[in-house]
Amino acid sequence: MTRKVFIILTIAIFFLFLFLTFWGDKGIFHLTRLKKELSRIRENNGKIESENQRLKEEVRRLKYDKRYIEEIARKELGMIKEGEIIYQFDISEDKKEGK
C-alpha cells in the first residue's frame, strides 16, 4: 500500500510541476506572452522616439529658421507680407461637384 501511495504522490507531483512549467506565473506560456509584449513595447518606443526626433527638429526650426516660421505663419495663420494681395475665390457647390 505504501508503494502505491508513493507512486501516486510522485505522479501527482510530476503533473503539478508540469502544470506550473507551462501555465504557472513563470511558466512557458507566460514567458511567451511577456516576450510578445516586450516586442510590442519596443516597437512602440521606436515610433515614439522617431516622433520625438521629428518634434525636436521642428522646435529647432521654429527657433532658428526664419523661412520656416514665415511658412507656418502663412499656412496656419493666413498672414501676408506688407504689400501682398491675397485673392480668395468662393467656389459654389455646383462647380465643386462638377455640374
Image: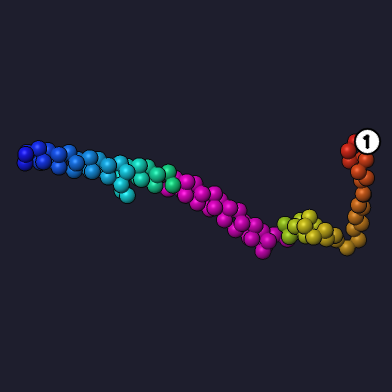
Quadrant in which residue 74 is drawn: bottom right
Q: Is residue 14 left or right of residue 39?
A: left
Q: Position of residue 29 (x, y in %)?
A: 35, 42
Q: Is residue 65 above or below residue 34?
A: below
Quarter containing the C terminus:
top right
Residue 51 is inside the magenta segment: yes
Quadrant in which residue 22 is drawn: top left
Magenta-colored segment: predominant secondary structure: helix
Foreground residue, 53 or 34? 34
Q: Residues within 10 Å of mark 1 (few under 14, many from 20)?
A: few
Q: Residue at x 23, y 43 (%)?
A: 16
Residue at the disc numbered 1: 99
Number of numbered markers: 1
Q: Residue at x 6, y 41 (%)?
A: 2
Residue 62 is inside the magenta segment: yes
Foreground residue, 76 or 96? 96
Foreground residue, 67 or 13? 13
- Local SS, label 1: loop
The residue type indicated by label 1 comes to Lys
Foreground residue, 5 or 37? 5
Quarter containing the N terminus:
top left
**Stretch in magenta:** 38-67
User: Outermost residue, left direction?
Assistant: 2
Quadrant in which residue 86 is drawn: bottom right
Q: Is residue 84 left or right of residue 24?
A: right
Q: Is residue 73 left or right of residue 8?
A: right
Q: Is residue 98 above or below residue 33?
A: above
Q: Residue at x 92, y 52 (%)?
A: 87
